């Protein structure tokens, strides 16, 4: 029989003991900034309820791209960055900037407005663009920053 391993013995390096209050504050502040930026973009480039939501598609794609860049950059170049950087910039700011709940509501609104082509296109295009965005951001950061080792690739 194999020995049992205590679940708390295998912690993730991003998990730190102690209170989560500072993390909550970092996420809230970053989220407010990101949501304000998204709101500003939607004011600059509004779309009607039955139009294809190009603005939100662009916002979500850019947010995913930047998330890929951020996570690789933090891992490769700033592994000792302060604990609050990732919650502030990633979960908070980029999480607040993107809006996947808004995206799903747009799909529902387009469907309800008898625009099934737009609804399906938005559903599929956003998912593909988000995955491509985060992948391209991560690949670009890897290409620019190297592998993170002294010798490069």
Image (tube, grey):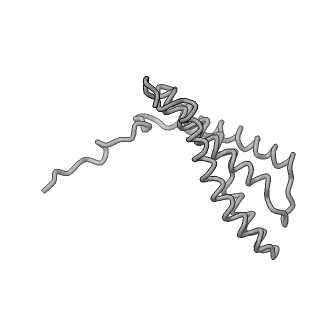
Q: Does residue 73 sit above or below 101 in this rendering?
A: above
Who's the residue at 87% across and 61% down the image?
48
Who's the residue at 81% across and 76% down the image?
114
The quadrant holding residue 30 is top right
- Residue nearer the viewer, 152 or 53: 152
* Left/right of residue 101 with respect to residue 145 in the rendered view: right
Query: Could you tell me residue 120's position as x and y percent?
Result: 71, 70
Who's the residue at 84% across and 63% down the image?
51
Q: Does residue 23 sit above or below 39 in this rendering?
A: above
Query: Could you tell me residue 3's position as x and y percent?
Result: 16, 51
Who's the residue at 79% across and 58% down the image?
53
Q: Give the residue furthest to the left.
A: 1
* Left/right of residue 89 with respect to residue 109 in the rendered view: left
Q: Quadrant of the N terminus?
A: bottom left
Q: Does residue 8 sit above or below 100 in this rendering?
A: above
Query: Could you tell me residue 42's position as x and y percent?
Result: 82, 49
- Residue nearer the viewer, 30 or 141: 141
The quadrant holding residue 32 is top right
Query: Could you tell me residue 8's position as x and y percent?
Result: 31, 44
- Residue nearer the viewer, 146 or 106: 146
Q: Give the residue furthest to the bottom.
A: 114
Q: Does residue 12 sit above or below 84 in this rendering?
A: below
């Amino acid at each position: 029989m194999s020995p049992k391993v205590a679940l708390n013995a295998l912690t993730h390096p991003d998990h730190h003991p102690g209170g989560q209050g500072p993390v909550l504050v970092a996420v809230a502040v970053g989220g407010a900034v990101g949501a304000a930026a998204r709101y500003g973009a939607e004011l600059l480039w509004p779309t009607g309820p039955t139009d294809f939501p190009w603005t939100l598609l662009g916002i979500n794609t850019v947010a995913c791209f930047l998330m890929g860049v951020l996570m690789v950059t933090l891992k490769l170049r700033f592994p000792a960055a302060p604990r609050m950087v990732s919650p502030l910039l990633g979960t908070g700011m980029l999480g607040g900037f993107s809006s996947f709940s808004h995206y799903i509501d747009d799909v529902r609104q387009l469907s309800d407005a008898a625009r099934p082509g737009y609804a399906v296109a938005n559903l599929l295009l956003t998912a593909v663009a988000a995955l491509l965005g985060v992948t391209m951001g991560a690949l670009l950061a890897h290409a620019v920053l190297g592998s993170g080792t002294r010798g490069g690739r």
